[in-house]
Image (tube, rainbow, N blue to C red):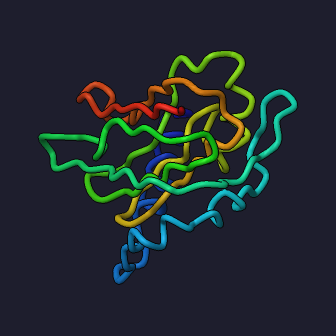
Amino acid sequence: MRFNGLALVAGAMAIVACGGGDKNAQQTSATQNETAAAPATQNTGAATTGTAAMAPITGKTVEVKMIGDGQTYKFDPANVTIKQGDGVKYIMISGGPHNVAFLNVPGAAQAQLSANMPNQMKELTSPMMMNPNETYTVSFANVPAGKYDYHCEPHAAMGMAGSVTVQ
């Protein structure tokens, strides 16, 4: 009986999360993303690990599209190279829900990367994006140089993965 109640609540939450959305939303132009430091200031009480504080984007913002068509699930481009201070804006295009979950982050980088990820679902994991044109921006300001691997949790088994290399 308890299971049925949990299943009912979970189903209702899924219906609410999948419904609605702005059907006429416009995609953001690439030129706006070059100067978009604003998403880095959207921290609305995200959990931070250790003593790191949110560090806003001070450079450019690179776009990575999240695409799923029922047969192929991918980040486009899957691998990006940026400079410290840049940001990565993930855009849900199709085949959601999608998210970004960073894997095997070195201890020295965990606190800052976590602090730079607003509204985390769990540590180093973005919330689920359900509707086309939803975005999630991660600042790599004050994050040490290195390679940061990530995947989409719902589509990890289908190879939806990528990396951000910070120089």
Q: How many numbered markers are drawn? A: 0
Q: Which of the 4 image quarters holds residue 117?
A: top right
Compared across the picture, whether 12 is left or right of 75 comes to: right
Where residue 96 sits in the image (x, y, percent)? 33, 51
Q: Provide residue 109's location: percent of width, then percent of height.
A: 68, 25
Who's the residue at 39% across and 39% down the image?
80
Q: Residue at x 72, y 61 (%)?
A: 41
Q: Please give left or right for residue 76 compared with residue 153 in the image.
A: left
Please state which of residues 6 and 110 is positioned toward the viewer in this rendering: 110
Residue placed farthest to the right in the image?
51
Residue 9 appears in the rendering? no
- Picture coordinates of residue 154 (x, y %)? 36, 36
Residue 51 seen in render: yes
Q: Looking at the picture, tell me which residue is in the foreground, 167 or 52.
A: 167
11 above or below 107?
below
Q: Residue at x 66, y 49 (%)?
A: 119
Left/right placement of residue 77 relative to residue 36 reads left
Q: Position of residue 21 (x, y in %)?
A: 43, 73
For image coordinates 75% across by 47% down, the residue present is 55
Q: Nearer the viewer, residue 56 or 73?
A: 56
Farthest bottom residue in view: 24
Nearer the observer, 109 or 9: 109
